[in-house]
Image (cartoon, rainbow, N blue to C red):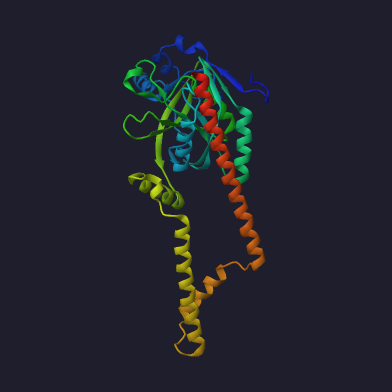
């Protein structure tokens, strides 16, 4: 039974997995999977798939989603969440937002969700998740919840080898929560932040429930095809970040934004003067008119919205005030985080 909305969602595991070996589970897979994902440990498909193939009595069925496209903004949000995690936290989780199109899922945004894991129990900030979702939908009403993300956990069996574990037993419990939040089966995105190979490994999984004699037993997490897809604006930002990181001075060597704006405005003014000069010569009869050139000028002028100067000044000033307010709040947040880190270090000593 789930708690009321004022309490965090708490889930726990059952010891069913210890009562049945993998070969018995694979032979007892049924065609009507249970509607719940909970009360079961998480399993990777490769171990169960071998057992199922050896028995030949059952299979896991087909997956409705076969391709996942993730935007760079999502990966940056996950890495930022991992960097700001509390000391001693094993992993972080969050909600994935995006769109579904048949067999393809596009993940365009993400936000962090507080949670706590203790043994075989998981507590998730359900109210926080719904509040953040409502705020995101106000800005992007077309996005929906498509799954959840998590960072990889260190391998408890051999922590010295530096390898990470993508799926944990408690992943089934978190997956159950997001199965109730999504319209379709949720996608599980795992980001390996160990940087053992100087790269961030990203994997996407789809879960299939397993039951024995109608009783939920485990979850099979099947890895599906994943690709990083960036829009034009994201590609420009990433190229700028890579270019800044490749220099010796880092971001301090980037071109001054005001100078870049001045250069672009000078180019725009030069093009306007050239166009005005061409129109004056056509009107005076100095040069012959060109129909294609005239249509291009007309389309360009029609694309510019007609706004009175006083209205434009008001819009510009409002946007400038909003920008200054965001900058002010960002500086306050940075200062607060710095003070909090100093206090944590002092209290920790």
Q: Is residue 111 left or right of residue 8?
A: left
Q: Quadrant of the N terminus?
A: top right
The residue under the point 39% across, 15% down is 23
- 162 relative to 204, above or below: above
| Location of residue 344 in the rendering, given as x and y in whole percent from the top left corner | 52, 24
| Location of residue 91 in the rendering, given as x and y in whole percent from the top left corner | 47, 25
Nearer the observer, 126 or 333: 333
| Location of residue 295 in the rendering, given as x and y in whole percent from the top left corner | 50, 76
Occupied quadrant, residue 66 = top left
Q: Is residue 37 visible?
A: no
Residue at the bottom extreme of this rendering: 285
Q: Is residue 195 left or right of residue 216?
A: left
- 317 relative to 330, above or below: below
Q: Is residue 234 left or right of residue 249?
A: right
| Location of residue 214 in the rendering, given as x and y in whole percent from the top left corner | 53, 17
Nearer the observer, 338 or 139: 338
- 304 relative to 103, above or below: below
Residue at the top extreme of this rendering: 19
Q: Is residue 326 visible?
A: yes
Task: Give the number of marks.
Answer: 0
The residue under the point 52% across, 87% down is 283
């Amino acid at each position: 039974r789930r708690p009321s909305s004022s309490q965090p969602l708490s889930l726990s595991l059952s010891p069913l997995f210890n009562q049945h070996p993998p070969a018995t589970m694979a032979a007892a897979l049924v065609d009507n999977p249970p509607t719940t994902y909970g009360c079961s440990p998480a399993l990777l498909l490769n171990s169960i798939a071998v057992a199922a193939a050896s028995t030949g009595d059952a299979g896991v069925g087909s997956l409705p989603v076969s391709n996942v496209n993730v935007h760079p903004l999502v990966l940056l949000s996950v890495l930022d969440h991992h960097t700001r995690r509390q000391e001693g936290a094993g992993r972080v989780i969050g909600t994935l937002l995006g769109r579904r199109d048949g067999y393809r899922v596009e993940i365009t945004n993400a936000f962090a969700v507080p949670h706590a894991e203790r043994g075989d129990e998981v507590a998730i900030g359900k109210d926080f998740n719904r509040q953040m979702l409502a705020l995101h939908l106000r800005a992007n009403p077309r996005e929906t919840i498509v799954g959840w993300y998590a960072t990889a956990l260190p391998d408890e069996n051999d922590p010295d080898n530096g390898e990470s574990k993508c799926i944990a037993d408690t992943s089934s419990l978190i997956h159950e929560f997001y199965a109730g939040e999504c319209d379709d089966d949720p996608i599980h995105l795992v980001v390996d932040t160990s940087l053992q190979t100087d790269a961030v490994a990203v994997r996407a999984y789809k879960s299939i429930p397993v039951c024995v004699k109608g009783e939920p037993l485990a979850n099979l997490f099947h890895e599906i095809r994943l690709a990083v897809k960036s829009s034009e604006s994201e590609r420009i930002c990433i190229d700028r970040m890579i270019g800044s990181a490749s220099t010796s001075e880092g971001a301090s060597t980037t071109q001054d934004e005001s100078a870049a704006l001045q250069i672009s405005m000078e180019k725009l003014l030069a093009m306007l003067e050239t166009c005005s000069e061409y129109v004056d010569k056509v009107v005076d009869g100095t040069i012959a008119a060109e129909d294609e050139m005239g249509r291009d000028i007309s389309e360009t002028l029609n694309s510019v919205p007609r706004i009175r100067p006083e209205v434009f000044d008001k819009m510009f000033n409002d946007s400038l005030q909003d920008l200054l307010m965001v900058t002010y709040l960002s500086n306050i947040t940075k200062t607060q985080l710095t003070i909090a880190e100093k206090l944590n270090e002092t209290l920790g000593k």
